[in-house]
Amino acid sequence: MGTENIHIIPTSEWLKPDAKPLIIAGPCSAESESQIMQIAESFANSGKVRLMRAGIWKPRTRPNTFEGMGAEALPWLRKAQEQFGVKWMVEVANEEHVRLALDAGIEIVWIGARTTVNPFSVQEIANALEGEDIPVFIKNPLNPDLELWIGAFERFSKAGLNKLVAVHRGFNTYQDHIFRNSPNWEIPIELKTKLPQLEIVVDPSHIAGKRNLLHQVSQKALDLAFDGLMIEVHPNPDEALSDPKQQIVLSNFDSFLNELEFRKTHFVDAVSIDKLERLRSLIDEIDYNLLENLKRRLDIVDEIGQYKADSGVTVFQLERWIQIIQDRMKYGQEQGMEESLIKEMWTLIHNASIKRQTEIVNRNLNERDIFDA
């Protein structure tokens, strides 16, 4: 089953009234009935939160830590839903969670990152939800694996679940980073490229991991034209039973949203559209020139590879590589370019060059073996 067979119904058709960007908020964990009622009343009064989230089953890294209130919390959500007219969504990780959530009247579920990483668990939940007309939000897997993420959408779509939304919560990496989880923005952007009809909500809480970084991540998500935010909010985060550092104080949430800049996703006036198209045409012309020059470079690389093969010289020349990277880095920096961009670009080009030259050398060796035989 390919991505072209994934049918997705946009939120505008099942979430009324439609609101963009979609704001989802609520506590990391449902901890008590009073906590849930307080948050639900606050959101109902402000009218800025479209959906409410609460974790009731919490997959934790280590045992003997708070793993959520479980099914005990479901009546709290139902009471808040009935009293304040809010819609709740909860995380489900297995068939039993699905059954209990549906029995409690939960109308939306999400699949957590620790579940998305396991195709068996995803399939179990998809099977349990088959025949239900329920929206499913799917978080990215813990590791930066786009195909694994897409596979989860394929499994739910195959089970007849079409109200699907992606949630980008960042990726666990071993790189030093100011964030709890690396954003790797290029991955959700690539997901959007492969599935243009899919809406993507960003989870700044899990990306940032710290309260003081939430605005930065949220604004970045909006600037990249993602479709919404899922933010953790708590009446008193410092006393939260899980993830206290990444939750916003409930009383500050309205001002937090007000400080974000919600930009238009498209130009609407003819003058701006015309200017944008002219600038894009210039980019297209430059890109074609880049590709033509890259092709010329690779042709020369092939000549060098053949010369090395004929001369019995090794493909990789450390001194030459050091010279190239130092020279290009220096020149690029003089042009005001980012060091990381230059290094990444030339590493890719160099790796491609090594691969092509290695293939030439191996081909020559094979031809000699055939001749000698």
Image (cartoon, rainbow, N blue to C red):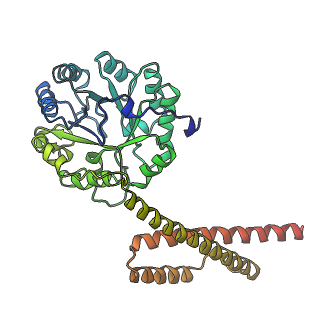
Q: Position of residue 366 (x, y in %)?
A: 80, 67
- What is the quadrant of the C terminus in the image? bottom right
Residue 95 vertical position relative to residue 361 in the rendered view, above or below: above
Asked whether, in this view, residue 258 is left or right of residue 170, the answer is left
Q: Residue 309 appears in which quarter of the rendering? A: bottom right
Can you say whether 123 is above or below 199 in the image?
above
Q: Nearer the viewer, residue 267 or 345?
A: 267
Q: Residue 245: give x, y in percent of width and height.
A: 18, 47
* Residue 315 in sight: no
Residue at 36% from the left image edge and 36% from the top image edge: 112
Residue 292 point in image, percent of width and height: 62, 72
For residue 99, side relative to residue 36 (left or right): right
Farthest-out residue, top: 103
Q: Residue at x 23, y 53 (%)?
A: 261
Pick whichever, 34 or 355, lies toward us.
34
Q: Is residue 143 left or right of residue 299?
A: left
Judge by depth and name the residue closer to the eye, 39 or 264. 264
Identify whether 49 is placed above or below 258.
above
- Residue plotted at (29% across, 39% down): 62
Which quadrant would residue 100 be assigned to in this image? Answer: top left
* Residue 272 image point, x, y percent: 37, 61
- Depth check: 230 or 124 in front? 230
Q: Is residue 352 shown to the viewer in this render? A: yes
Q: Quadrant of the N terminus?
A: top right
